[in-house]
Image (cartoon, coloured by chain):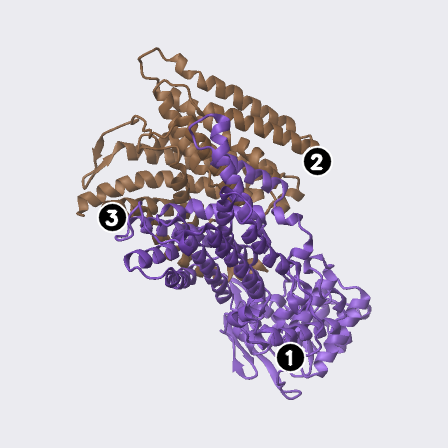
Amino acid sequence: MNVTIALLLAQDGLSNGVIYALLAISILLVFLITRVLLVPQGEFVVLAALTMVQLQKGAGPSVIWLLLALAVTAASMSSLRAWRTGEWRRLPAVLAFTLGAVLFGAAASATPLLTTAGAAPHFALTTMATLVLVAPLGPLLYWSAFEGIARASILTLLFAAVAVHYVLQGSMLPLFGPEGFQAEALISGRVDVGFTRVSLQLLLLCAIFVATVGALWMFIGRTIAGKILRATAVNARGARIVGIRPETSGAIAFGLASLIGAVSGVLIAPLTTLYYDSGFLLALKGFVGAVTGGLASFPLAAAGSLLIGVLEAMFSFQFSALKDSLVFAALLPILLILSTRQLSDRDTEAEE
Amino acid sequence: MSPQPLVIAGTALPLIAALAALAIPDYWVTLLTYAGMSAVLCIGLVMMTGYGGITSFGQAAFAGIAAYATAILTTGLALSPWLGLLTGLALAVASAFVIGWITVRLSGHYLVLGTFAWGISLFYAFANVEGLGGYNGIGGVPGLFGGSRLLFNALVWAFVAVALLGAVRVLDSRIGRAIRAAPSKAMAESFGVDTATAKLTVFVLAAALAGAAGWLQAHYLRIVNPGPFHLNASVEYLFMTIIGGVGSLLGAIVGATAVTVAKSWLQTSVPALLGSGFNLEGVVFGLLVLGLLQAAPRGMTALLPASFALRPRGSRRSETRLPPRAKPAATQSVLALRSVSKHFSGAQALDRVSLDLNAGEILALVGPNGAGKSTLFNAITGLSPASNGTVALLGEDVTRLPARAIARRGLARTFQHAHLRPEMTVIENVSLGAHTRTAQGVAAALLGRDRPEESRIFGEARGCLAELGVAEFANARTGTLSLGSQRLVEVARAVACDPIALLLDEPAAGLRAEEKQHLANAIVAMRDRGIAILVVEHDLDFVANVADRVVVLDFGTVIAQGTPDEIVRDPRVIAAYLGQAEVSGDVARALHH
């Protein structure tokens, strides 16, 4: 491996790393607020990517069926909960969101009709339609599967997340079929920066990444909804005492996760061929990234994810068969260092 | 000794399964065999996850190690499958030692991710390492008993019975209680438990059971390939234990059986039902798990009567106690602090605190909230060592020793917020106090050789409970006790250490008058036995009642010390509590009464 190849590999790695970073940030966000380790985050990404490809081909998006099924489940589970607890106040908002998601989803599914036959649909149109179809899945999923067990142990929540992953992945096979999908590149070519040539694709990825993180930062820092999220993340019980419902925060967090997942899906679609079951490994890598940030720090999680992307690119060049094996094995020493560092003072304090 | 329902069920179920195979169709025998093989692995998972607090997404990989080992030995080298069993188990155990050594040191979510990491890594290793046959695997593995399905089924269920009874013996032993206490790390370490070793122990035991399951699978399927050892398989095993009930050993059997039967039914019926070529069993299965988590988060066995839960056999009436520790002579210095300081990233919690605690005295440490009392406790006990200065126990510098090493030297403590394991019985919690005074290990527990020591431990624990006036709760689940009773149980546990120095952190908080009296009597009785006692307490009446000397701490420094009488009149003390410099004698008197 010479320097030129290494630089090109690093670019490849960074492209994937940006995606992993977005995954890591969503997983971290959801974990801090709801304590759910969101394994299905990878499915959001893949759903968005596959939807993007379908729309580009002018086909109807299969994800609408999933959206409908989740909408029905979310509406009935929320109604059931309202009926059982006698707590009706939040129900209208949930039902309104669900109905809106279905209506907008239906409209987005109709976008292929807007394009004249033979012509390629406009990129902005397919992107918008993809976001509209995939972003509402988060809250719907939260109301369907997680709100009812919101106070269970982290372990139970993790099991629920894994079960949701199985359900989503299993339903994606009949919806999309076993074949792989890759979207058309948004932009191609490279720009010379002296010591190497940087792909425009990577620059675009980085720009969108920065924009997404910036928007998220603004949302969390500057809006009431963001303050609700922060309050719940810092202390869920305290937030409840001052009248903030963890359920509201949970739905918002899941919504942000599916929105960022949809953006990641749009971004990754042209980079690599994705299959209905590609989500799990993606989520695991995002998970690894989140953990390198100590499951607490967003900047560290993003940096760790970029590193994983680069490591993976290097490994896949040198030992392609053992690529995934090595990425995960390399994790153990990192975890060990993090863990021993954490064990000093904070752990005992935290347990008191 | 009263036989417990769990042990009876553990013996009867496998027997029924082995006998039932004689009368049921082949299809059901196959399912029964599969269920039994999974149950062996799941029993290990329950020990590890339900009792030891370690969630593993990599158990199938250990099954794989044993399966590949026996496949290579019995095909390539044509050796006996029984030799394959020994080798497979040895390899699974050895790799569990290596992987576990790293993994159990990870905390919380790191640990879960760690198991993901090696689970996946081993899977790819099985598929890619030369000589293991790639994704096709190794075929031609010999069957057992000339291919008799009935005998094989009986063997599988014999494994289940041995695994279950072994698990009961281990969990209901000195090491088992250490394993069950390990999730509460600070508490367990404070009672001399090496939590990393306890976790490694249960990790290795679970890996051995996984290895046994892998060996059975290899000789049942007669082919070994990476598929059954994938992360998905590990997840399925976890689902089995959750569905059965992760905190219940019977749950492992119930869950394994339920999932095996449901899965087989789904595989045959779902495609027919939906008329699709797609494999939808995963979806239905995931939905079932989700439904169950919402409806019965503690699993199917939560519906069983509580008598099927693990109960200590040591609860029989034993009066013999453990031999007492040698005590230092009265008035000898036991604990000596010299200029102990502690700062947390800039904040000075303790500033050059020096104090002495002698054998046979009760020293009260008082001070307003945030004065640094609990920090001082943590510095003395080694949970959060001092930044500067020295702590000496019987003249030996223990400043930098880990909490468990200090505990072994005869220091016991209670916590400001009771740190008891709610799902263990009261007497089991108290028995943990005797951990450093006893020695029996896992092998003794498995062979039942630890019973004499166990009965002494429980005799000791019962004695300590009686001393604190809470003997009536001995067999209750600790989580069901009132907060006041839990505090007394905490003190009883510390007493069960037979310590030379005892540190009590607000023991009287939340106690009723009668309970306080019991506590005061017990503390005084311990002092009279020559134990050095340091007690943090806000209840000044209680302090005046029991303490020989009082030290007052404020803003991390000692501001006064003397007899209780002197202290309540000391203007600096009154100022520290009431926040003003001049205080009339009336207030001082009011404070006193």
Image mark 3: chain? A
Q: Nearer the viewer, residue B31 or B449?
A: B31
* Image marks 2 and 1: residues in contact by CB distance under 8 Å: no
Question: Are dots 2 and 3 on a single chain?
Answer: yes
Viewport quadrant of the N terminus of chain B: bottom right
Q: Position of residue A27 (x, y in %)?
A: 46, 42
What residue appears at the point 29 percent right and 35 percent down from the top-left corner?
Answer: A202
The outermost residue toward the bottom is: B329
- Identify residue type, mark 3: Phe
Q: Toward the viewer: A124 or B492?
A: B492
Chain letter of the brown region: A
Whether residue B278 is situated above or below residue B11 in the rendered picture = above
Q: Nearer the viewer, mark 2 or mark 1?
A: 1
Which circle's residue, 2 or 3, is located before the other in the chain?
2
Q: Which circle marks residue A319 in the picture?
A: 3
Provide the residue designation for mark 1. B322
- Of the 4 image quadrants, the one containing the C terminus of chain B is bottom right
In what element is the residue under mark 2? helix
Count of numbered badges drawn on the protein: 3
| Kind of residue sitting beneath label 2 | Thr
Instruction: Label 1, secondary structure: give it.
Output: loop
Q: Which callout, 2 or 3, points to the residue nearer the camera? A: 3
* Residue closest to the far top: A116
Q: Residues within 10 Å of mark 3 (few under 14, many from 20)?
A: few
Q: Nearer the viewer, residue A235 or B189?
A: B189
Q: Colour of chain B?
A: purple
- Circles 2, 3 touching at the beta carbon (< 8 Å): no
Tag 2 and tag 1 share a subunit: no
Q: From where the camera sits, is residue A250 visible?
A: no
Vertically, is B591 above or below B253? below
Same-subunit check for callouts 3 and 1: no
